[in-house]
Image (spheres, helix red, strand yellow):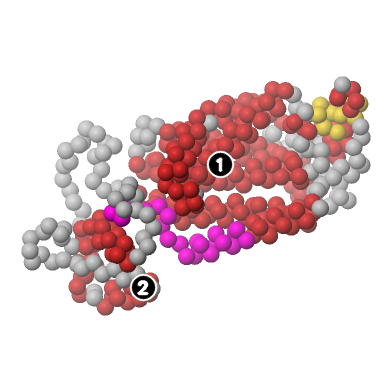
Amino acid sequence: MVRAIGGIAAIIFIALFVIVLVQAFNTRDFVVPTNGVIGQGKADPVAENAADYQTLAVRAQLQRWRGDVGPAPEAEEGARQFPVNYTPELSPGQRVADWLDRTEDRNDLLQPRRAIEGQTWVAANPVVDVLQQPQGRDWRAFRNSWAMFGGGLFIFGVCALLGLFLAWRGRITIREGESGESVPRFGLVERANHWMTAVAFILLALTGLIILYGRSLLRPLIGPGAFGDLAAGAAWLHMALLFPFTLGLVIMFFAWIRHNLPTRLDWEWLKRGGGMGSDSSLNPPARKFNAGQKVVFWGVIIGGAVLVATGLTLMFPFLWAGYDGMELGQSIHVVAGILMIGLILGHIYIGTVGMEGAFPAIWSGWVDRNWAKEHHSLWYEDLLQRGKIYPRRAVED
């Protein structure tokens, strides 16, 4: 049954992966400047006819650089103008051919751009004292390509791999079965902090995905008004959750750092894949945290620190970073967030459906004796020597 669920999930996520991949090759700008010339709204709805396209084309032409399109419309009569030729039926190759056929008319475009030097009137305000900020186009290109499609491919790819692994491996069971005796694993403070951090991160991930993908995915479904309210609420909640998430990271770091320092055992554990390849594989020895858990720990600590630093940069614009710094910070924030979502998806999988006996460790704080012996043998032996093994009935009472 579990394998069948894994196979179905794998098929669904592979299909979603393919859909995003196809969209990536048929990309269009998902984040574009809005004109507000169709329907007189704050932003243009989807163009539905040739007149709408022509209106948008004319407005877009007016917004382009003067060096690209010639003198402004209000220039003196007789000044050289470049006509607006919007032909949506032309393919990209035909557009290039059409442009090359009229090279003489556009010779000015082939000349190197000339810098304009002078003095502005807002030098006292460095935030608005920007005549042109071309790095914004690089940020926008990243936002429209790698962030938009790369994030979807990564998340759906991770989910598909987890589904395939579940379909192939099934649930990792306790080979000797439950023993009826329990081992204390995590205390109340550790568990409370884990759940505070986990809930904060899940909500941060959901609100972040709404901010990143909502305009292109949710707005067409629920309408601009509802999406505006949802996006505003998501943005405020995203910022508010910074505080419990940061606090959780700090407590987690000091509580578990001594158990997560690298040792020689970790390399052996990684080489053997944690013994999770089959039921007959023997688990390599491990202390309280094995190498896989250490990877998750350091991924959360380092990735979380990056998210907090870049998030604060975006929450307090121009406090210590200018336009370039905020664009870079936003790009790093997106990449780190998507990578952490993939890491946590794997962590959730192993802790729930992927492995029998793992979830009680962070729920009740106790694990079965045989689970501890199979997955953390050195830690189990230490507990055994200290007499920390208890009958389950006594624990439940």
Rendered image quadrant of residue 128: top left
Judged left or right of residue 359, residue 340 is left
Measured as percent of width and height from the top left, residue 207 is found at: 52, 40
Residue at 68 percent of width and 45 percent of height: 346
Range of the magenta residues?
15-38
Mark 2 element type:
loop
Judged left or right of residue 171, residue 107 is left
Q: Is residue 37 magenta?
A: yes
Can residue 135 be seen in this snapshot?
Answer: no
For label 1, the crowd category at 10 Å Cα-Cα, with few meaning under 14, some 14 to 19 and many 20 or more, is: some
Measured as percent of width and height from the top left, residue 212 is found at: 48, 46
Label drawn at residue 89: 2
Residue at 31 percent of width and 53 percent of height: 39
- The residue type indicated by label 1 comes to Leu
Rendered image quadrant of residue 50: bottom left
Sequence-first tag of 1 and 2: 2
Label drawn at residue 206: 1
